[in-house]
Amino acid sequence: MTPVPTPQPAHLLALHADVQPAQSVLEADVYTLGRSPLCQIVVQRATVSRLHAKIEREGLRYLLVDAGSANGTFVNSQRLHAPHLLSDRDLIGLGAATALLHFVDPDPTVIPALRLHYDERKMLFSLDNQPLDLTPAQFRLLHHLYQFAGEVCTRESCAEAIWGRDYDPGMDADALDRAFSSLRSQLRRVEPEADLIETRRGLGYVL
């Protein structure tokens, strides 16, 4: 019987001498990145905060989270506004868009292409080529999730997308839950088996 190969852990490759160590195998549950020598991955740059970002294991995937840094965390030159599920060959910048780290996953998880399509000219979503009849709130929520497809969208960012203001947990929690429930129901009217929106407990939602 042929043995089943063991999945290889992902790793980070430093792209600059300011980053130490030159290679980090991601075997622990959490890795810290920052200017402090106490971080597992140390970046000696003035624009990098002492504790700048974290990489957290989520099953077989890895989540990059900005730790409230002063100058931001970037993936592929885009500043993060929510936790980001890392993909093979992602380029990570700390404090600036310039790539300092290269994420390599020898056993990448294949994410199937979404059956959801957005026609920007018509401002119309379709699922399996069937147009979706969405309320304005449903449209704003789905558009926000679609813009960050594959990434975690926090409850705060989703609420702001729907209502255009900061999220108030005491006032908005139930309304936000209803907004997600109604959007999921609308998607299932077109495709009963559709389960496109994944809840990440304690983090947010992923399309």
Image (cartoon, rainbow, N blue to C red):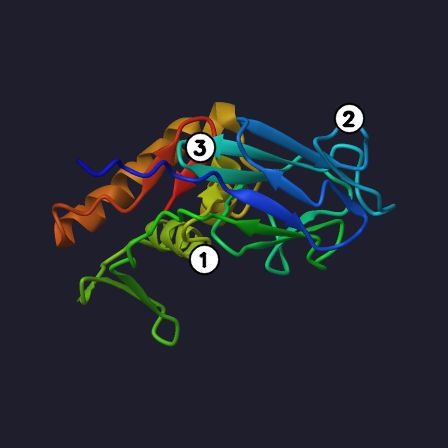
Q: Which mark is residue 58?
A: 3
Q: Characterize the local packing of mark 2: few (<14), some (14-19) or many (20 or more) Cα atoms within 10 angstroms.
A: few
For the residues bearing labels 2 and 1, Cβ distance under 8 angstroms? no
Q: Position of residue 3 (x, y in %)?
A: 25, 35
- Residue drawn at the location 81% of the way across and 48% of the way down: 18
Q: Position of residue 77 (x, y in %)?
A: 64, 60
- Residue drawn at the location 14% of the way across and 52% of the way down: 191
Q: Is residue 164 above or below residue 31?
A: below
Which SS class for mark 3?
A: strand
Q: Which mark is residue 38?
A: 2
What amino acid type is highlighted by mark number 3?
Glu
Identity of the residue furthest to the right in this view: 46
Disc nearer the start of the sequence (1/3): 3
Q: Position of residue 81 (x, y in %)?
A: 59, 47
Which SS class for mark 2?
A: loop
What amino acid type is highlighted by mark number 1?
Gln
Is residue 68 visible to the viewer in this orientation of the structure? no
Q: Nearer the viewer, residue 165 or 45?
A: 45
Q: Characterize the local packing of mark 1: few (<14), some (14-19) or many (20 or more) Cα atoms within 10 angstroms.
A: few
Which residue matches tag 1?
A: 147
Identity of the residue furthest to the front in this view: 1
Identity of the residue furthest to the top in this view: 170
- Residue drawn at the location 52% of the way across and 56% of the way down: 89
